[in-house]
Image: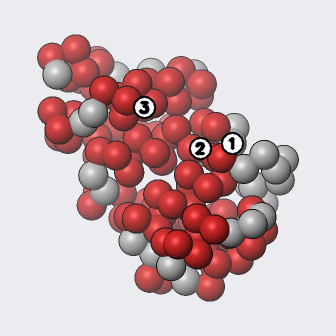
Amino acid sequence: LTGRLKAAETSNHLLFLVEQYENVLNEYHVRAALTRLAQSNETTTLSGDPGFRKLLSRTSELMTTFRSQALATVLWSLAKVEYDPGEPFLRSVIDASLPQLKQSKPQEMVNSLWACARFGYQPGDAFLEALVDT
């Protein structure tokens, strides 16, 4: 499934696959789907797409099980496609990221900060202090 998501030729095809396999999507599938959307040059409006909403829903369900790379990819991808998921979603990603910052790679930290800046979102003192201490 990961290979099919990465190879999807259009955002519509990718989101069709997400809808089809919604209940079996795992961290790797979510990361692959979001990365593919972010790398797409298509100007599809995602917010109204049922497949995109299902992808966000599945991301929310699994978020506490994601590792640092997947969490950074969630933030980066959504910022790249210019979709602001709102403060509660962003807070959930930041909260899930906090315990993993020590294992995070510098690029993951930068991507997360960049995404927060794009959203105009302040991730909080605890997150920023943890980044500095890493």
Q: Which mark is residue 112?
A: 3
Name the element at disc 1.
loop
Q: Which residue type carries mark 3?
A: Ser
- Percent across and percent down for residue 18 are 60, 74
Q: Quadrant of the C terminus?
A: top left
Q: Which residue is mark 2?
A: 78
- Percent across and percent down for residue 104 are 24, 36
Name the element at disc 2.
helix
Q: CA distance from mark 2 to mark 3?
A: 11 Å
**Mark 1 / mark 3, whichever is N-terminal:** 1
Nearer-the-camera pick, 107 or 66: 107
Q: CA distance from mark 1 to mark 3?
A: 14 Å
Residue shown at 46%/45% (left/top)? Answer: 73
- Percent across and percent down for residue 31 are 47, 57
Q: As drawn, is 38 to the left or to the right of 63?
A: right
Residue shown at 74%/54% (left/top)? Answer: 47
Q: Residues within 10 Å of mark 1 (few under 14, many from 20)?
A: many
**Mark 1 and mark 2 residues within 8 Å of each other at the beta carbon:** yes
**Does residue 115 lie above or below 73 as drawn?**
above
Residue shown at 29%/45% (left/top)? Answer: 68
Q: As drawn, is 115 to the left or to the right of 66?
A: right
Nearer-the-camera pick, 86 or 49: 49
Nearer-the-camera pick, 85 or 16: 16
Q: Which residue type carries mark 2?
A: Leu
**Mark 2 / mark 3, whichever is N-terminal:** 2
Q: Which residue type carries mark 1?
A: Val
Q: Which mark is residue 81?
A: 1
